[in-house]
């Protein structure tokens, strides 16, 4: 089998992980997390800690951050029959309808009742398991801004399922970036969780720093189930790029470090379509590598995930698994609250 054919097989992105390496809680302070620095020129690896992150970034690099903010998207309610329902908000489809995931049997037309007078009416059952709903309060359809205010009171931080625990008050702080201002994500851009205020300030002093927005959706956790990765239906997420940030991307001579996979996908989508706002459904993998992002900071990702395939789009599948094996040997912590990897 050729290398290219192998890179298109989902099975090529599988690996085993000791459950003890799954980070269920963050380290404190965040920048004391481990950092693996990988150099593409020679495949060399340096083991350090995140607080030393800036010393490895080439001079005159433009650094991009995702300023999305996680909302308390997980809520618990009941049907009129008394049956319990768990709802995970994903995103707005327009001004009044939302795409959600629901645990519990529901039919079209049914209403679900939550605390604080919030009501959800199921409008459509999609074949992929998602649901289209409208949210009401006081018999009036509410918009996203009103919904977020209510969710802040009654909702829960939607921790990834692999953490296998309920959220705590601390997660409202730790599962949120220091610079997140645009509410709408249901998962954190986790590479950014390692920053402290002091490190963020030093970064802004030393490097030109820019923002963009991509509201991370629940689809980020969806495993690739097709045998060939090209048959995977990639999820879409809303994004927006300020004009100043777009100008930097347009300047082909400027070097770019993407803080996270969400920033990478947003920049790469813009580089391909030229739109500063819309729905991003770009799937990066070895057969569709980056054309604009030069360097990547990211965490360690789930087996057979589109995020692992994105990492492989930078350094290849075999090299990605080699680096992951080294990370496991050195007891790096994996996934959202885990340690970080810098690809140069």
Image (cartoon, rainbow, N blue to C red):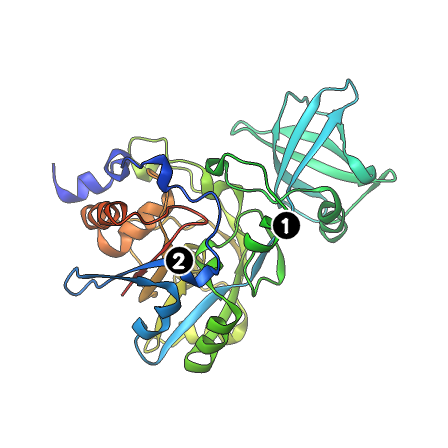
Most distant residue in the left direction: 1
Residue 173 vertical placement versus 104 (above, below)? below
Residue 312: where, in percent of width, then height? 27, 50
- 259 sits left or right of 44 in the view: right
Identify the element where label 2 is drawn.
loop
Q: Quadrant of residue 89?
A: top right
Quadrant containing the N terminus is top left
Residue 317 visible at all = yes
- 324 sits left or right of 105 in the view: left
- 14 sits left or right of 297 in the view: left
Residue 150 vertical placement versus 241 (above, below)? above
* Figure disc tally: 2
- Which of disc 2 and disc 1 is earlier in sequence? 2
Residue depicted at x 29% and y 30%:
227
Query: How far is mark 1 from mark 2, CA to CA?
Result: 25 Å
Residue 150: where, in percent of width, then height? 76, 46
Q: Which residue is mark 1?
A: 71
Q: Are marks 1 and 2 in contact (CB under 8 Å)?
A: no
Which is in the foreground here, disc 1 or disc 2? 2
Mark 2 residue crowding within 10 angstroms, few (<14) / some (14–19) / many (20+): many
Residue in the foreground of this view, choosing between 233 and 182: 182
Residue depicted at x 70% and y 30%:
122
Residue 277 visible at all = no
Q: Which residue is mark 2?
A: 33
Identify the element where label 1 is drawn.
loop
Q: Quadrant of residue 269?
A: bottom left
Residue 221 vertical placement versus 208 (above, below)? above
Most distant residue in the top direction: 81
Residue 273: where, in percent of width, then height? 43, 60
């Amino acid at each position: 089998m050729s290398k290219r054919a192998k890179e298109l097989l989902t099975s090529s992105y599988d690996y085993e992980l000791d459950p003890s390496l799954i980070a269920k809680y963050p380290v404190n302070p965040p920048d004391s997390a481990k950092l693996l620095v990988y150099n593409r020129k020679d495949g060399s690896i340096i083991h350090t800690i995140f607080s030393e992150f800036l010393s490895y970034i080439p001079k005159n690099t433009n650094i991009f951050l995702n300023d999305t903010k996680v909302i308390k998207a997980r809520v618990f309610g009941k049907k009129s029959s008394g049956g319990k329902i768990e709802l995970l908000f994903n995103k707005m489809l327009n001004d009044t309808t939302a795409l959600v995931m629901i645990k519990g049997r529901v039919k079209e037309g049914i209403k679900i009742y939550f605390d604080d007078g919030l009501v959800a009416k199921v409008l459509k059952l999609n074949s992929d398991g998602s649901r289209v709903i409208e949210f009401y309060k006081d018999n009036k359809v509410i918009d996203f801004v009103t919904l977020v205010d209510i969710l802040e009171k009654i909702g829960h931080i939607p921790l990834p399922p692999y953490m296998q625990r309920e959220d705590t008050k601390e997660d409202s702080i730790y599962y949120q970036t220091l610079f997140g201002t645009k509410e709408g994500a249901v998962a954190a851009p986790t590479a950014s969780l390692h920053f402290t205020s002091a490190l963020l300030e030093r970064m802004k002093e030393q490097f030109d720093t820019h923002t963009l927005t991509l509201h991370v959706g629940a689809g980020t956790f969806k495993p690739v189930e097709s045998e060939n990765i090209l048959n995977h239906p990639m999820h879409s997420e809303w994004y927006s790029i300020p004009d100043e940030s777009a100008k930097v991307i347009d300047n082909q001579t400027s070097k770019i470090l993407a803080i996270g996979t969400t920033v990478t996908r947003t920049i790469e989508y813009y580089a391909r379509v030229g739109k500063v706002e819309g729905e991003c459904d770009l799937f990066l993998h070895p057969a569709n590598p980056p054309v604009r992002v030069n360097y990547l900071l990211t965490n360690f990702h789930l087996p057979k995930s589109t995020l692992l395939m994105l990492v492989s789009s930078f350094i290849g599948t075999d090299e990605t698994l080699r680096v992951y094996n080294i990370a496991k040997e050195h007891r790096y912590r994996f996934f959202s609250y885990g340690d970080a990897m810098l690809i140069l």
